[in-house]
Amino acid sequence: MESYKNEFSNKDITVCYEPCKCVHAEKCAKELSEVFRLSIIPWINLDGTETKKIINQIKRCPSGALTYRKNFKKRAS
Ligand code: SF4
């Protein structure tokens, strides 16, 4: 079986989506449709709004299918 990455990044965060955990309540798509899109691929568009709003929405995912991590930032030397 082929596995594929469900990771999406912007400059601040990387979002991971685990479809096997998703309960398909469409909470994310209803509440933040600029980012979580039901009929467009890629379905997560992290350029849709500011990172803070995306993080707040991920925290409201009822199943834990959506998670995020902050991107490592290089220090200027
Ligand atoms: S909010 Fe979470 S459980 Fe609901 S549709 Fe989105 S990813 Fe799936």
Image (spheres, rainbow, N blue to C red):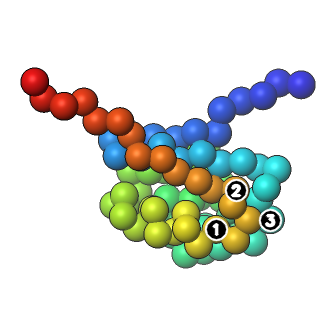
Q: Amino acid at mark 2?
A: Ala
Mark 2: secondary structure: loop
Find residue 61 and report its image quarter: bottom right
Mark 1 vs ligand 1: CB below 8 Å? yes
- Name the spot of residue 5 as percent of width and height, x first: 66, 32
The residue pinned by badge 2 equals: 65
Image side of residue 55 versus residue 28, left or right: left
Badge 1 local density, few (<14 within 10 Å), some, or many (20+)?
A: some
Image side of residue 43 versus residue 34, left or right: right
Q: Residue at x 65, y 73 (%)?
A: 27
Mark 3 vs ligand 1: CB below 8 Å? yes
Q: Residue at x 79, y 55 (%)?
A: 21
Outermost residue, right side: 1
Instruction: Please give the label number shown on residue 61.
Output: 1
Residue 40 in view: no
Marks 3/2: CA–CA distance: 8 Å
- Asked if 72 appears above or below 39 in the picture, the reply is above
Instruction: Evaluate if marks 3 and 2 touch, with contact meaning CB atoms under 8 Å apart.
Output: yes
Marks 2/1: CA–CA distance: 7 Å
Mark 1: secondary structure: loop
The residue pinned by badge 3 equals: 23
- Asked if 8 appears above or below 68 in the picture, the reply is above
Badge 3 local density, few (<14 within 10 Å), some, or many (20+)?
A: few
Image side of residue 23 versus residue 62, left or right: right
Badge 2 local density, few (<14 within 10 Å), some, or many (20+)?
A: some
If you read the primary sequence from the N terminus, does the residue marked by circle 1 or circle 3 appear first? 3
Q: Quadrant of ligand 1?
A: bottom right
